[in-house]
């Protein structure tokens, strides 16, 4: 690797328009969203989540089967957020108005997997923005300067998705923390996973650098879908992005909740600046 490329590969920072100055995480957005973080990741912790739910993680430690741990986690979610007893959470089915009590973390995941530009996807992008400080760059179109209509539509979808819900963002906090707990158990000693994403055009993403013919430094949206199967990624575009994703940037991986999301093979990856290798079909 020549000196110029090495400097590019190690210094690419997350652009200011793609981040907030603060977040609710142990690392600031400019660091966790950088290329350096992709190459040298460290654990990410959302403020107070692991401490508040320490009893859950302590109860999971002696459980050897991942499927059993997933059942314990979902039981904890049902009891902790009263998902099966919405009246106790303050929801009155006899009251008029929009009833959103059933908009839980599983519905948000299913909604994203069905439509990455839908209302549930707007909620996920908003959650990443709040917790990690990474701004959404695309929702049914670019959200940057000159795309005010798109941005207002995103804000509307986000508001509709969060309105009158049951601590939905806190549910997503715990989902991320549980995912990271499982990463430490199922990917012992590993720091990255190689994933693939199909796109129709490279310039769908902001290109920061191109250090080689088939290597790009891109700013990805604040949350993205990837696959571990290159052939599966082929179905979504002619250009295939091959990315070494830090495990600490996974919100969901296939099999995390096996009895709740059967057959779903997508990885949900938190965004930022990434080095990607690009190939054609």
Image (tube, grey):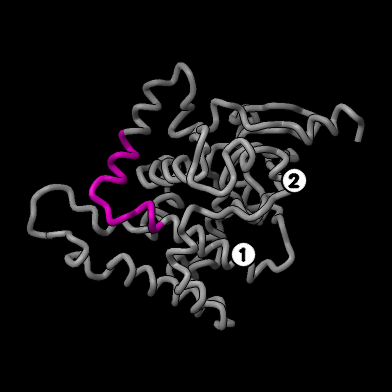
Magenta residues, start to end? 156-171
Residue for point 56% across, 78% down: 61
* Residue 275 disc label: none
Instruction: Count residues near mark 2 (Cα–Cα under 10 Å), then give few for <14, some for 14-19, many for 20+.
Output: some
Identify the image quadrant of residue 33: top right
Q: Is residue 107 left or right of residue 29?
A: left
Q: Quarter of the image for the N terminus: give it.
A: top right
Residue 43 in the figure: left or right of residue 100? right
| Cα separation between marks 1 and 2 | 18 Å
Residue 87 in the image: state x and y as whole percent: 17, 65
* Closer-to-camera residue (213/256): 256
Marks 1 & 2, CB-CB < 8 Å contact: no
Q: Is residue 149 magenta?
A: no
Element type at mark 2: helix
Residue 130 location, x and y as percent?
Answer: 44, 42
Residue 162 is covered by the magenta coloring: yes
Where is residue 188? Give x, y as percent.
Answer: 70, 68
Question: Is residue 211 in view?
Answer: yes
**For residue 39, which numbered disc appears in the image?**
2
Q: Is residue 279 visible?
A: no
Q: Position of residue 12 (x, y in %)?
A: 72, 31
Main structural element of the magenta stretch: helix, strand or loop? helix
Can you tell which mark lies on residue 183?
A: 1
């Amino acid at each position: 690797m020549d000196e110029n490329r090495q400097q590019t590969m190690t210094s690419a920072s997350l652009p200011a328009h793609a981040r907030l100055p603060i977040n609710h995480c142990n690392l600031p957005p400019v660091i966790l969203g950088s290329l350096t973080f992709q190459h040298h990741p460290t654990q990410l912790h959302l403020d107070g989540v692991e401490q508040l739910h320490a009893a859950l993680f302590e109860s999971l430690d002696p459980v050897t089967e991942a499927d059993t741990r997933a059942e314990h986690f979902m039981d904890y979610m049902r009891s902790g957020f009263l998902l099966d007893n919405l009246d106790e959470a303050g929801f009155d089915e006899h009251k008029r108005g929009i009833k959103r009590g059933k908009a839980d973390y599983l519905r948000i995941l299913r909604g994203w997997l069905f439509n990455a530009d839908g209302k549930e996807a707007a909620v996920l992008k908003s959650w990443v923005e709040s917790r990690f400080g990474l701004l959404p760059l695309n929702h049914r179109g670019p959200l940057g300067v000159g795309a005010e209509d798109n941005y207002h539509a995103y804000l509307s979808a986000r508001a509709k998705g969060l309105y009158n819900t049951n601590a939905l963002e806190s549910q997503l906090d715990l989902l991320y923390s549980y995912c990271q707990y499982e990463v430490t158990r199922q990917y012992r000693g590993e720091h990255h996973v190689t994933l693939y994403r199909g796109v129709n055009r490279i310039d769908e993403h902001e290109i920061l650098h191109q250090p080689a013919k088939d290597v790009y430094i891109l700013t990805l949206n604040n949350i993205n879908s990837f696959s571990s199967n290159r052939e599966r990624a082929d179905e979504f575009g002619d250009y295939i992005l091959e990315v070494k994703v830090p495990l600490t940037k996974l919100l969901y991986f296939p099999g995390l909740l096996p009895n709740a999301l059967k057959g779903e093979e997508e990885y949900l990856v938190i965004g930022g600046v990434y080095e990607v290798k690009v190939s054609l079909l």
